[in-house]
Image (tube, helix red, strand yellow):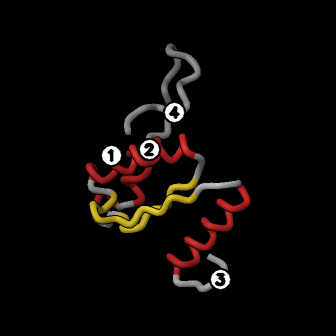
């Protein structure tokens, strides 16, 4: 949750190039005031395993509800894009429309 990525270019320079997964999700969930109830994990097996671990951390942070629906989308890149689009349309209430 607090690992810095990408790493700073040099240990002697100021660290101004970090993206913290926990900070990003906390901002999107308004620091736990509006935790996510639906989550989609999109990627191949290793990425999905890492994302499951992140989701567990986000639950502990209060940014994802414990009873959140987690949908795993995997397969070929084209299939993943189609399935992600369908998930986004479903979540926004659009039946086959544009999200």
Residue 57 got which mark?
1
Which mark lies nearer to you, 1 or 4?
Answer: 1
Q: Which residue is mark 3?
A: 96
Left or right, 63 with reference to 3: left
Q: Tell me what residue is drawn at x 51 percent, y 13 percent.
A: 12
Q: Tell me what residue is drawn at x 55 percent, y 31 percent.
A: 6
Q: Tell me what residue is drawn at x 46 percent, y 47 percent.
A: 51
Q: What's the distance in space between the residues labelled 2 and 4, CA to CA?
A: 9 Å
Which type of secondary structure does the marked residue at label 1 adopt? helix
The answer to whether residue 36 is above or below residue 74 is: below
Residue 21 got which mark?
2
Residue, far right: 78
Q: Which residue is mark 4?
A: 5
Q: Quadrant of residue 75?
A: bottom right
Which type of secondary structure does the marked residue at label 4 adopt? loop
Crowding near pointer 4: few (<14 within 10 Å), some, many (20+)? few
């Amino acid at each position: 949750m607090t690992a810095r990525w990408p790493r700073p270019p040099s240990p002697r320079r100021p660290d101004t190039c970090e993206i913290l997964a926990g900070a990003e999700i906390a901002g999107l969930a308004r620091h736990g005031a509006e935790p996510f109830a639906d989550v989609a994990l999109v990627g191949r097996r290793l990425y999905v395993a890492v994302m499951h671990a992140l989701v567990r951390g986000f639950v502990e942070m209060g940014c994802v509800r414990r009873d959140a629906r987690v949908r795993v989308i995997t397969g070929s890149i084209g299939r993943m894009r189609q399935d992600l689009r369908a998930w986004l349309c479903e979540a926004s209430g659009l039946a086959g429309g544009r999200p």
